[in-house]
Image (cartoon, rainbow, N blue to C red):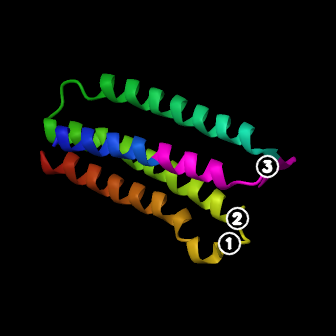
């Protein structure tokens, strides 16, 4: 299971990188992010913020997972390691949605609203699976 999770994590990193580069290529110069106090942000600044957040979150999760999975079963350790896939996939979908929202001339954003819900749905499924793995052994 650990090998499969490592492959999924690698695929999610490649997916994130591909989506980030594709969205960056198609974004207008000024990106509308609708944050409090920030209306528009330059696409280069957004790119570096998103990439930096990705690196920091993955680094923190990897350190936590490496120290937190010592002394537990391989199945449970593999399941815990899969959180990286969930987080990276969620980052990729959110970035994709930012790209869709800022490209309204070519794409209808209402057709892609489901991208916002994929990450939380996968996270809930992951938590249910974690609870299952924890209580399965007892």
Q: Residue at x 46, y 27 (%)?
A: 59
Task: Give the class, few, some or many, for how many residues have Cα within 10 Å of label 1's Cα (few <14, many ≥20).
Answer: few
Query: In whole angstroms, how far apart are the C-alphas of marks 3 and 2?
Result: 11 Å
Q: Residue 74 lies in what quarter of the image?
A: top left
Residue beneath disc 1? 106
Residue beneath disc 2? 103
Quadrant of the snapshot with the N terminus: top left
Q: Residue 62 lies in what quarter of the image?
A: top left
The disc, 3 or 2, on the residue closer to the chain's N-terminal end is: 3
Looking at the image, residue 41 sits to the left or right of residue 73; the answer is right
In the rendered structure, are the residues bearing label 3 and label 1 in contact, judged by CB atoms less than 8 Å apart?
no
Task: Give the class, few, some or many, for how many residues have Cα within 10 Å of label 2's Cα (few <14, many ≥20).
Answer: some
Q: Residue at x 46, y 63 (%)?
A: 118
- Label 3: element kind: loop
Residue 29 tag number: 3
Q: Residue at x 72, y 61 (%)?
A: 102
In the rendered structure, are the residues bearing label 1 and label 2 in contact, judged by CB atoms less than 8 Å apart?
yes
- Label 1: element kind: loop
Looking at the image, residue 4 sits to the left or right of residue 16; the answer is left
Q: Residue at x 19, y 38 (%)?
A: 2
Q: Which residues are magenta?
A: 16-40
Query: In whole angstroms, how far apart are the C-alphas of marks 1 and 2?
Result: 6 Å
Q: Residue 138 location, x and y as percent?
A: 12, 45
The question of residue 34 being in magenta is answered with yes
Query: In whole angstroms, how far apart are the C-alphas of marks 3 and 1?
Result: 16 Å
């Amino acid at each position: 299971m650990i090998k499969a999770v490592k492959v999924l994590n690698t695929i999610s990193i490649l997916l994130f990188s591909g989506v980030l580069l594709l969205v960056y290529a198609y974004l207008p110069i000024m990106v509308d992010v609708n944050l409090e106090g920030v209306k528009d942000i330059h696409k280069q600044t957004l790119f570096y913020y998103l990439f930096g957040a990705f690196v920091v979150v993955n680094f923190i999760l990897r350190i936590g997972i490496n120290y937190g999975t010592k002394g537990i079963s391989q199945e449970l350790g593999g399941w815990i390691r899969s959180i990286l896939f969930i987080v990276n996939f969620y980052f990729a979908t959110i970035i994709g949605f930012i790209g869709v929202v800022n490209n309204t001339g070519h794409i209808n954003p209402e057709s892609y609203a489901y991208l916002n819900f994929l990450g939380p749905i996968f996270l809930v499924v992951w938590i249910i699976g974690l609870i299952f793995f924890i209580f399965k052994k007892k």
